Image (tube, grey):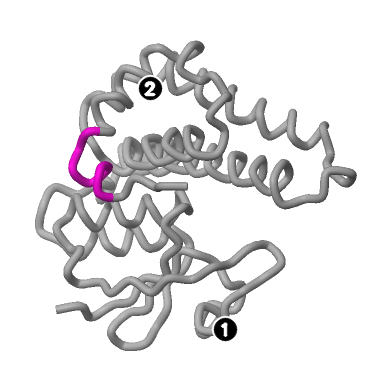
Amino acid sequence: MATMTLFHSPLSPFVRKVMVVLHETGQLDRVQLQAVNVSPVAGDEQLNQGNPIGKIPALRLEDGGVLHDSRVICEYLDTQHVGIPLIPREGSARWRRLTLASQADAIMDAAVSLRYETFLRPAEKRWDGWVEAQSQKIRRSLTNLEREHLAELVSGFDIVAIGVACALGYLDLRQPHFGWREQQPGLAAWYAEVALRPSMVATAPVA
C-alpha cells in the first residue's frame, strides 16, 4: 500500500535515480507518483508545499513531512529496506561512496544546465562559454570514472553505479551527439550491461 508520494517528472535524471532505488530495494509499491511539470521559470503549487524551493524529486512521507534533493531521498529509502545497503552505513567506505555519488550528481547537474542553455534559453541570449564549461565538467568527470573508478562500478549496482547510469542515460537522451562512448569505452561497455537491469529498463525516459 502506498504511504508516500513522489513528485515525479520522468525525464529528470534525479527523479530516475530515486525510481531506480525504489525498484532495486523493492519499495515501489510504497510510493504513489504525482506528475509535475516544472522548469527554472515555472513551478508547481503542490510541489512547493513543504518544499518552498520547488525541487524535484520531492518525497512526501506518511506523516506529511517532505524530503527533497535526490541524495536525501535515496539515503532515506536506503534505511527503509532489509536488503544489502546501497550506501555503506559507516566508515571510510561510506564517505568514498557518497563522494562518488556526488560526482555522478554533478554530471547530471551539468547536463541539465546544458539542456537549459541550449534548449530553453532564446538563441540570441545563449552563452557559448557556459555551454563549454559544463561540457568540460562532464568530460573531466567521465574521464575520471573511466580511469580511476571503473572497477568499483563493475563490482556492484550501488548508489554510485545507479547515479552514473542515470547520468549517462540522461546524456543519451538530451545530448545524443556528446560522443562519450568513443572516449570512455570501458564505461560504455559497463553501461550497456547495466542498462538491461529491470530497474533501468522500467525507468528509461522517452523524450
Front in this rendered view, residue 34 or 153: 34
Identity of the residue furthest to the left in this view:
82
The residue that label 1 is drawn on is 45
Residue 30 vertical position relative to residue 192 in the rendered view, above or below: below
- Residue under the point 40% across and 12% down: 185
Which segment is the magenta one? 196-202
Q: Residues within 10 Å of mark 1 (few under 14, many from 20)?
A: few
The residue that label 2 is drawn on is 149
Could you say where residue 151 lies in the image, as x and y percent from the top left?
29, 19
Q: Residues within 10 Å of mark 2 (few under 14, many from 20)?
A: some
User: Would you say 132 lies left or right of 110 here?
Assistant: right
Could you say where residue 30 lies in the image, as x and y percent from the top left?
19, 72
206 magenta-colored: no
Could you say where residue 90 lies in the image, as x and y percent from the top left?
28, 48
SS for callout 1: helix
The amino acid sitting under disc 2 is: His
